[in-house]
Image (cartoon, coloured by chain):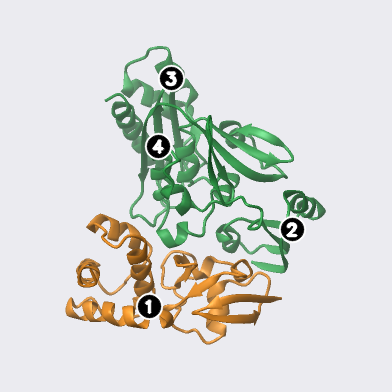
Amino acid sequence: MLVKFNLNGLDVEYIIKPGEYLLDTLRANGVKSVKKGCDGSACGVCTVLLDDKPVLSCSVLTAKVEGHRVTTVEAIQEEAAALADCFSKEGADQCGYCNAAFALAVHALKQENPNPTDEEIKDYLVGNLCRCTGYQAQQKAIKAYLGGKK
Amino acid sequence: MKAKSFQRVSSVEEAYKLVKESPRNKIVAGGLWLKKGNAEVETLIDLSNLGLDKIEDKKEFVEVGAMVTLRQFEQSKLVPVMAREAVKAVMGPAFRNVATIGGSVYGKFGFSDVVCGLLGYKVELEFYPEGKISLIEYVKKPGFYDGILTHVRIYKEDLKAFFKKVGITALDYPIVNVAVTKGKEYRIAVGSRPLVAFRAEKAEAYLNEGGKDFAKAAELVVEELKFGDSISNKGEYKKQLALTYVRRGLEEVNK
């Protein structure tokens, strides 16, 4: 079947299977920044923004995205670069596999709640797993990023 | 999950007609649980166009459309606080932006924090074409309705409420979940036993008749409700947790 939606500001049309999930559609069409980790709605590395809200693309049927807006890290490069600087200053960066999803989640958090408390940052990032680090450095980096942008 | 076609319906009647046509035509709510199985679906029925994504104040109750996401629900000031807390206990925001109230309630999953929290309130479900049924009757009833769950109504009451999900991390299934409310009457629900949350009617009756011993009420809860082993936890452990958290919940709502 044919599906039409807006991907990073461009209207796109893809031929998909009716039971296909967004993660597979995006990767099949070259958007490899969206990672396939658990493929079971737990790890969060497949996070994209759907109408500006973070969703697990492994668990969103592509057909349901018809007429909506999908954002991947390619569309928020400036913000992602600024966050990456904060990550490197805090040593929060190791393999980088989860970074694109983190950047999207933090970007969405900033839109929704520009001055989050520590607890609100933690709550927002439940489900964005990082298997290299212990989250302390990320927490500091995210605070620095949000603070720096005020 | 494999599917042969996908249809965004324009009326509840149309969805119901498709459901009745074949047991292999399935309603998509968020689409999360469908993915878990190896179901071979004929037609996926999408309810996104039916305006079921609203939370409305209807004086006596708050009416929640079945396609409202868990995230919308937890962020709505119309929804009572403990019900929001229970929903917030489910995974992370990116999960809750996909999962729906309708899918969570219809499926009456054993692990459901959503159902457990809602059982603390007077909640009514609206199905097409079956009509109204209380949440408590729906969870007790074996099996599912054929029809479409369209709305979940939470009646407004003045009550004190407690909710606890016991889990190893935020992303784990609950080992047990407990909801306790005290308004005109007590309500106690315990879920993930590993079966879906049930109300503990004997303990409620004891308290409603003036019983004051919370430890005894908790004993009545674990005597009445069945606890069994799940993959990672023994039923006996779940029972001990329920004993503690029901008692703490009762203390909390009596502060």
Q: State how far apart marks 2 and 1 are (Cα).
A: 36 Å
Amino acid carrying label 4: it is Val
Amino acid carrying label 2: it is Asn
Which residue has dot 2 on it?
A: B25
Depth check, mark 4 against mark 2: the one in front is 2
Q: State how far apart marks 4 and 3 are (Cα).
A: 19 Å
Which residue has dot 1 on it?
A: A100
Amino acid carrying label 1: it is Ala
Identity of the residue drawn at 23% across and 66% down: A139
Identity of the residue drawn at 74% across and 40% down: B129
Q: Which chain is orange?
A: A
Q: Which chain is green?
A: B
Sequence-earlier tag: 4 or 3: 4
Which residue has dot 4 on it?
A: B178
Q: Is residue B252 above or below residue A67?
A: above
SS assignment at label 1: helix
Whether labels 3 and 1 belong to a single chain: the reply is no
Identity of the residue drawn at 38% across and 12% down: B210
SS assignment at label 3: loop
Mark 4 in CB contact with mark 2 (< 8 angstroms): no
Q: State how far apart marks 1 and 4 are (Cα).
A: 37 Å
Q: State how far apart marks 3 and 1 are (Cα).
A: 50 Å
